[in-house]
Image: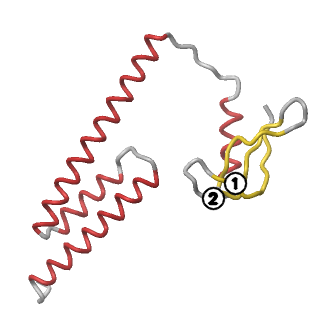
Amino acid sequence: MPYDIIKRSCKQSDGSKGTHVVVKKQADGKTEQVSCHTSEEKAKSAVRAKHAHEGKTMKITRKQLSQMIKEEKNKLLKEGFLITDLISDAAKALSAGEAGTLEGLAVKISDALMPENELRAWENLFDAMIDAAYAVEERDDPSGY
């Protein structure tokens, strides 16, 4: 299927604005928007990916699909518990003014599987907690040692 890139305002799936649209040419000459991107380079990457996967289909049984869904569900549940544990540990570290521990937890949260905007929000939260912990350390020990 042929794809084109058109520069125009669009709305991405997460609600943010985009500037380049990937469209699929239809047999009747019309085009259908396939995706929205923030740059021409990202749109080109999307077209390359679509061409790379064209014609490649995989047939699976219902049992295989069920197994794949169960595995993905377990991964997501595991991530949910990981986040809960990290937040609990972060609260303890913040209470104790342990900025170094918070920095380590912030690295772990960046490895979590979640949407980019949600991940960014968690990273911002951890950055704020790290700043607060350093402020507590500085208040408790103004000499800097």
Instruction: Report the residue at 45% width, 48% height from top.
Output: 115
Give the secondary structure at mark 2.
strand
Name the disc covering residue 10, or none: 1
Q: Please rate how many residues cluster around mark 1, counting C-alpha atoms within 10 Å: few if below 14, some from 14 to 19, many from 20.
A: some
Q: Quadrant of residue 22?
A: top right
Numbered circle sitting on residue 34: none
Question: Which percent across, then down, holds residue 110?
Answer: 35, 54
Residue occupying the point 13% across, 60% down: 92
At label 1, the amino acid type is Cys
Q: Residue at x 58, y 57 (%)?
A: 16
Foreground of the two, 143 or 63: 63
Question: Mark 2 highlights which residue?
Answer: 17
Where is residue 36 drawn, in percent x and y? 67, 49
Extreme residue in the right direction: 29
Question: Which three-letter amino acid code belongs to the residue tagged 2?
Answer: Lys
Mark 2 or mark 1, earlier in chain: 1
Label 2 neighbour load within 10 Å: few <14, some 14-19, many 20+:
some
Vertical arrangement, residue 140 with respect to residue 83, above or below: below
143 shown above or below 38? below
